[in-house]
Amino acid sequence: MVYYNIEDIPEDALRTFRSTFSDLKITTISDIVHIITTLDDLDEETISMGDEFIYGKSLEISDYKFIGGLYENFDERTPILEIEKLNKFNKNPYSPNILLLGGARSGKDTMAEILNQEFGLSYTSSSQAAADIFIYDELKDKYGYKSPEECFEDRVNHRAEWYNMICDYNKNDRARLAKDILNKSDAYIGMRDREEIEECVRQGLFDLIIWVDASKRVSPEDKSSFNIDMSCADIIIENNSDFDTFKKKVINFGKFLYN
């Protein structure tokens, strides 16, 4: 997406850029574009503006690619910035297909990150995939979202609405979103509907279903948007202690799974 004003940039992307150049004052799009275009040894990219293309430089930081350029029009040079969310988690043909379950803040995303860092597991959360595929387009006008990332970050305020939208997306095939995710990733993170799980099992989509249990430290979720429990899983990984203990469990599990 192309941006002309710094106020429209997704918060996570702006925070990522500012943390990399923390010694520089960054208050406008012009500041960001100036930093990018004056850096050496960066790849040249094009920014699409309808039928026009602007040449600029691209810089990858963490999960984002920032492309900065100047649009020349009637002796004026307007700084413009394109930001792309990178997909660094490419599907590994040697990895089993995994479904990671658990309530909010249980640690399932953390487990996926550890397995990615230590063993190369690729993964996609159900919420991020749904935002990218259809929810952002359906909700952007209703809530004024500027990007799929902003829509994704606000999901905690609309759990039941998201749950119903995903169920509707899957109404003709309960495994539809899961198959979309598994086309690109080894793991699906955060399925919330029992019928969806049962249909995925019936179609044989997952080799292993894991539940991350944090029931001793996190309150249970509202059943209006979460109708599953640990009985849906093949394996349960407990996460009721500290991070180091949980990480050790996940790494030991990964060694067993991948070695």
Image (cartoon, rainbow, N blue to C red):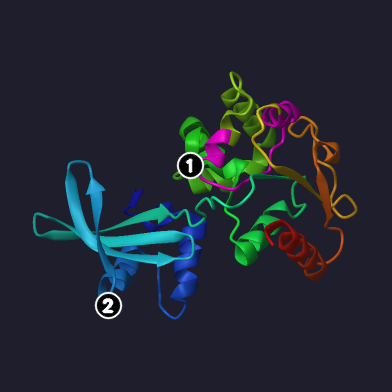
Residue 44 found in image quarter: bottom left
In the orientation shown, which residue stands out farthest toward the top? 172
Q: Position of residue 50 (x, y in %)?
A: 22, 41
Count neighbours of disc 2 (C-alpha within 10 A) and say few if under 14, some if 14 to 19, many if 20 or more: few
Number of numbered markers: 2
Amino acid carrying mark 1 in the image: Tyr
Please name whichever residue, 119 or 229, is drawn nearer the observer in this view of the structure: 119
- Looking at the rendered structure, the secondary structure element under dot 2 is loop
**82 within the magenta span:** no
Q: Residue at x 63, y 33 (%)?
A: 162
Element carrying mark 1: loop
Instruction: Tell me what residue is drawn at x 85 percent, y 37 percent.
Output: 231
Is 171 left, or right, of 90 in this rendering? Answer: right
User: How far from the left and from the top, in percent, is residue 116?
Assistant: 61, 60
Give the Cα distance between marks 1 and 2: 34 Å
Amino acid at dot 2: Asp
Q: What residue appears at the point 20 percent right and 59 percent down from the top-left corner?
A: 55
Observer able to see residue 213: no
Q: Which mark is residue 40?
A: 2
Q: For the magenta stretch, what is the residue range?
A: 179-201
The x, y position of residue 73, in whole percent, is: 12, 54
Residue lying furthest right in this view? 216
List the residue tagged with mark 1.
145
Among the 4 quarters of the image, the one containing residue 39: bottom left
